[in-house]
Image (tube, rainbow, N blue to C red):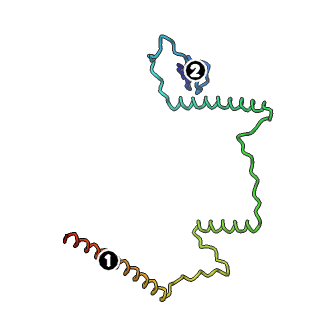
Amino acid sequence: MVMFSVAVRKKGGGGNSAAPCLPAGVVWITALRFRWKNRGKSSHMPTPKLTAEILTAAILGIEVQKQKLDAKIAELRAMLPGGPAESAAPEPTKAKNFSAATRRKMAAAQKARWAKLRGESEPPAPATPKRPKPKRRISKEGLARIVAATKKRWAAVRAAKAQQEKAAKKTATRKTAA
């Protein structure tokens, strides 16, 4: 089991004995193995509280380590047979070519969007607007045919229901008579 100890040198002197040569604000992290006599026991010293200053210093130290690692990785990539490969930078995309008519349409559409956002009235419509189709209406004869068909259908439904009730009454009277 490994335990980590953190030493931070604060600004204004008062150096830490664990890291005497550290500049102010630098974090020194070391890993210590538990000794047999201290196994599973906590030390008698109070645990340091993680303050914002300590966390900021830890972040700075880790960022420095990250920069060093990135430099090493770049060196190793340069040693590869293909040479240094820039995987982080995407390749630039080629611009699309639009015709002049398409660009005019796009410009007009963008102007209309901006006018709508600003609350301006829409630009005047073209000189020859299309007439909307007239609303379709049903004729009197057509409506009369629909009404007649509906009445006929409901009359058939009522007749079938009356027939069923008549048959049910007939069977009920036979059972009571027997």
Residue at image point 57% right, 69% down? 119
Place residue 81 in its image quadrant.
Answer: top right
Q: On the picture, is 50 further left or further right than 73?
A: left
- Note whether 171 is above or below 72 in the view shown: below
- Point out the residue furthest to the left here: 177
Q: CA distance from mark 1 to mark 2?
A: 98 Å
Residue at image point 43% right, 83% down? 149
The earlier-in-sequence mark between 1 and 2 is 2
Kindly identify the amino acid type of the residue bearing the numbered disc 1. Gln
Residue occupied by mark 2: 30
Place residue 170 in its image quadrant.
Answer: bottom left
Using the image, tell me which numbered label, if any, was put on residue 163: 1
Residue 124, position as x, y percentages in the image: 64, 77
- Judged by depth in the image, the label closer to the viewer, 1 or 2, is 1
Place residue 146 in its image quadrant.
Answer: bottom left
Element under label 2?
Answer: strand
Residue 122, position as x, y percentages in the image: 61, 73
